[in-house]
Amino acid sequence: MRCLTHPLLRRLLGLSPLCLPGGVSQNKGPILSPKWLPLRQSCSARPGLVTATDVVNYWQKVFEASGIPEARESSEYIVSFVLGAKTFQSLNSKSLYTPLTAVQQEQIQQLSIKRLERMPVQYVLGEWDFQDLTLKMRPPVFIPRPETEDLVSLVLEEESRKCEKNSGLCFPVPVPHPVILEIGCGSGAIALSLLCKLPQSRVIAVDKKEAAVDLTRENAHRLLWLRAGSDSFSFLGSAKQLLFWGPIDFIVSNPPYVFHEDMACLDTEILRYEDLDALDGGDDGMRVIKTILALAPSLLKDSGSVFLEVDPRHPDMVENWLQVHPNLLLVLRAIHKDFCGIALSPL
Ligand SMILES: C[S@@+](CC[C@H](N)C(=O)[O-])C[C@H]1O[C@@H](n2cnc3c(N)ncnc32)[C@H](O)[C@@H]1O
């Protein structure tokens, strides 16, 4: 399992990139310093030969000297990727100590230069893991954050609760397979994970950005569901066509929810490469949240729910907003504080 402290999370934890004396400022591009030791000089293998461990150590030092966050992890992920592994820890001793070929060294250098330009590792590798899936990643489509995996788990728990409740009845009735709508699918992480875990469900993924819909489609094809002739996955570019799909069991979304005034504080990786529209929730972070809530009653079944990932300040704001919009007949049912998600149901 690949795991990085995500820039957003790092900001919340108050961690900052390691700054060595003489390191470059975060906002400047990398300095390809002539002071770097030639790679071979810092090697442990026979003269002229470099191993994976040498290269990881070498690029770690270069990243640290350039103020690149998570220098060790970045270096390990790049080298492992070129060697066909997901993590450095999963490389066997043969891979660790066999000298790298010139082609492998060149590939590692090309990828490391992208990291020096502050490109997130997920885009450098062109793929990343979310739950059990390996998804293609491409700028500027939003990189799924680890905390969003909790949102998926909550929907799965709700579905299994519904099934258990039904099986406890004296005369269980067949539970129809759920219809799930994800609003703002990005790379397809949430929608595809849910479809993977609930293969009988019908999943509709919507995003206003063509680049996101295209990447979700590619990820779905890559994961073979569509090639297998499944018609359980649909893509839409516009929420206007949604009424056609109702009634829906679960609306799930990790909408743009960063308060506009906080946008400028985001890490360089985000500001340079990710679609800022995917993060910017407007002055109160609620721009898209309000749109989803206003749309939900016309789409949901009576027993349906909305699951949203939000900022820790939002649950109170959502509750207040619902009080002045009683016509929506939605009630805030639960708040899960670990990643700050909320679940709402029709009254
Ligand atoms: C924070 S990203 C989440 C992406 C993905 N669900 C994930 O968790 O990795 C928000 C996504 O919502 C999309 N989006 C923003 N406003 C939207 C709207 N009004 N309708 C549909 N999608 C929207 C953005 O293009 C972006 O892909």
Image (cartoon, grey):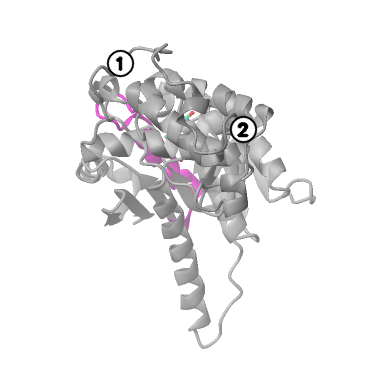
Front disc: 2 or 1: 1
Residue 38 relative to residue 5: left or right: right
- What amino acid type should be assigned to the residue bearing mark 2? Leu
Q: Which element carries disc 1, helix, strand or loop?
A: loop
Q: Which residue is mark 2?
A: 215
Residue 150 is situated, as x and y percent measured from the top left of the image, at 40, 54
Span shown in magenta: 280-304
Q: Earlier in the sequence, mark 2 or mark 1?
A: 1
- Assess whether residue 302 is covered by the magenta stretch: yes
Residue 108 is situated, as x and y percent measured from the top left of the image, at 57, 29
Using the numbered discs, state the Cα–Cα distance from disc 2 to disc 1 in whole angstroms. 34 Å
Q: Quadrant of the C terminus?
A: bottom left
Foreground pick, 5 / 9: 5
Residue at left offset 41%, top offset 59%? 154
Q: Which residue is mark 1?
A: 24
- What amino acid type should be assigned to the residue bearing mark 1? Val
Residue at left offset 43%, top offset 21%? 37
